[in-house]
Image (cartoon, coloured by chain):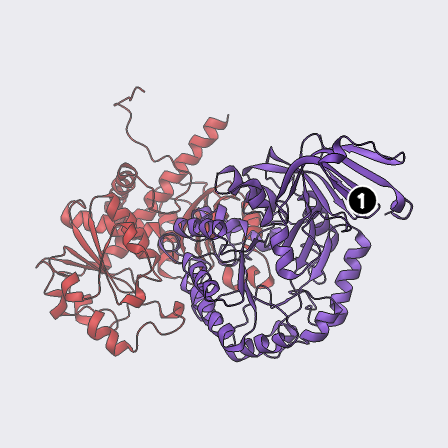
Amino acid sequence: MATTNISTQHTLYINARLIDPATGRDEMGGILCDGKVISDIGPHLNNGKPRANSKIINCKGHCLVPGLVDMRAHLGEPGEEHKETLETAGRSAVAGGVTTIVCLPNTEPAIDDMSVVEFVARRARKLGLSKVYPYGAVSKKLEGKEIAELGMLSEAGAVAFTDGFKTVSDIQLMLRALSYAKTFDLLIVQHPEERGLSKNGVMNSGETATRLGLGGIPRYAEIIMVERDIRLVEMSGGKIHFAHLSTSDAIDCVRKAKARGLTITCDTAPPYFALNELAVGDYRTFAKLSPPLRKEEDRQAVIEGLKDGTIDAIASDHTPQDEESKRLPFSEAAAGGVGLETLLPITLELYHNGHMSLIEALNLITHRPAKLLGLKAGKLEIGRRADITILDPERGWKVEDKTLKSKSKNSPFDGRPVQGRTMQTIIDGRLVFQAEG
Amino acid sequence: MIIDEQTPPRFHRRHLLGTEGLTPEEISILLDRSETHVQQNRQANKKKSVLNGRTIINLFFEDSTRTRTSFELAGKRLGGDVINMAVSTSSVKKGETLIDTAMTLNAMHPDVLVVRHPQSGAVSLLSEKVNCAVINGGDGAHEHPTQALLDALTIRRRLGHLSGLVIAICGDVLHSRVARSNIHLLNTMGARVRLIAPVTLIPSGIEHLGVEVFHNMNEGLKDVDIVMMLRLQRERMQGNFFPSIREYFNFFGLDEAKLANAKDNALIMHPGPMNRGVEIDSDLADDFGRSVIREQVEMGVAVRMACLEILTENLDQSVASNL
């Protein structure tokens, strides 16, 4: 991709509704990009005279926001290139307005070694699509036995540590990881699920699972692990972040732990506030997720958690699975759904349904996750890299396999009419995605 | 809407995947048709020709002797060509998927596939990929509709009706597709269903399916018309659901003392194969006055004949409507 000559190029975006959740800015105006960085921002740019060599782009009143930050996605490369590659994930991300992705270490080989961190970062940089920051593994080979080289992985660029969609189950290992991570002030991210309770289950435990004759995963599998780890944080003084919380009680545990001043944060993913277990319907494997879709009361509680700030961020939980992994009897099918392209519109449902303002909804997928992981992203600020998304929050479209750019099409929102479309995505001042029509 | 009262109700479905969602009329149609085959099956000449030229494939992904034989006899007595395929030992081991197997068989133009599979929902998944009629011969812990129909036929012939009866289903409800199919069918027909089992063998939320749950067998059997025992599916049990067979039989095995709580003429049923001395006392199982276990097997053939017959009639209808 030719980028060398335009480093001195000025691009002026005008007639935009500037929304910057980090500063609370929400006003009509413009933004000036000087090569790769933002050099000016504000209402004055709408009327001011552009410099002679400036390219002017009229945003037609659409929202100009910081590029979205997705703090949890599985990208498939290396190891599962038949499901997704860094390139197809990157195309999917920019189509979804996501300019920064934090990827899980559940690759083959796992991201438990500096060389793999560097491999992923280098491959992503070369593609020039969304920026990719890897999580490092908590345990070597994700086996849950020995602590990985957290310090060196961190120096190589790992932004935080998790065993991804595997729970760090061993209590001694988790305690050590939290304590050791404290040495370098690193964050541990946990998929909270007590395996002893969940191992024979494939969907949420309860009436629907019983009717379908499927093994249930009780809500308590999540609650118990959250409660345990909160105690370990108390013991160790470490920092933990819980991924994709799905139950009212787990959210309540975090709420109380935060009130006690513990360094605990958490996120959720769009399926947990936009769907409930009824989406499984007649054995729909696209609705097989981990954690499983829960009851309506839990879905409502997730929305409450997002509204009162207990839940800090929304992540896509992007998990590509090919047809071979999903076209199976429900119990045998792989869990997970693609999410990079639905992160924006499903998050905006919170705004369209009147649960929060537009800027509050956008905060959950820009500034909040970036701040949580210490990333220089998710903010419109002079001197920063120009990673920008221009979006129309009202534009309707339908989630369908032919519209999705991801290599895998397993969206739990398949067939859903949604509102909110990325019009343009700009990374380092470069246009990398433009909506058709 | 004008309802033509002259038209007899029909069973319109292409497949029989479960009893959930069947209407009382549909169930009655299947049971009434089954009746017609009971007498025929007791004659010296049991053969009819209604399925002449039809191909029925028994596709069993799970070991079964009784159900497979019952379907095989049913198909043959109606004059159809029946092929048995035990898949657990062939292609699946070579990595062929369920869908591949379905597509392969579909290309051979069968008229009916009878499918049994260890995973819940697998039969419905397969039915979406084929052009023929599909009968669920049991999928995981989900449904086993012909078992519930043969149970209903057995009860109806003995007691004359289903509506208003109190029926206790006892034992391993957690792993049982027979229990689920019976709950749906019996509720639809106006019977009252009780479940009796230790807490560990009752699946969560099952009370929402319209049943009353008991953990004490003496209380649960009080004044019931039917005692339906389930087989303990020890092969599906992962982990400790109860401490020992001895303890299980002591509290949840059917014996004379516990049965005394039921109505005097209460019937004893079991879908087989029985674990004698585990869930049922051996003498009770053989008590012809009360145990209808052998009759259930007999009704099984008649019910499966009716299902094969009605679903193939529907195939003709759908061909006709496509022209």
Chain containing the residue with disc 1: A
Residue A18: give x, y in percent of width and height.
67, 39
Label 1 sits on residue:
A430
Q: Nearer the viewer, residue B48 or B305?
A: B305
Q: In which quarter of the view is residue B96 placed? A: bottom right
Residue A4 visible, this orientation:
yes
Comparing B230 with B209, the one in front is B209
Is residue B161 found left or right of A162 in the rendered image? Answer: left
Residue B307 place in picture, x, y as percent: 35, 44
Question: Does residue B43 show up?
Answer: no
Chain A takes which shade in the image? purple
Residue, x 70% and y 53% (percent of image)? A377
Which of the 4 image quarters holds residue A324? bottom right
Query: Where A175 sits versus A129, above or below?
Result: below
Extreme residue toward the left, this view: B264
Callout 1: SS: strand
The residue lying toward the viewer, choosing from B118 and A73, is A73
Give chain B's shade: red
Residue at 60% x, 64% y is: A164
Position in image of residue A329 (x %, y %)? 50, 54
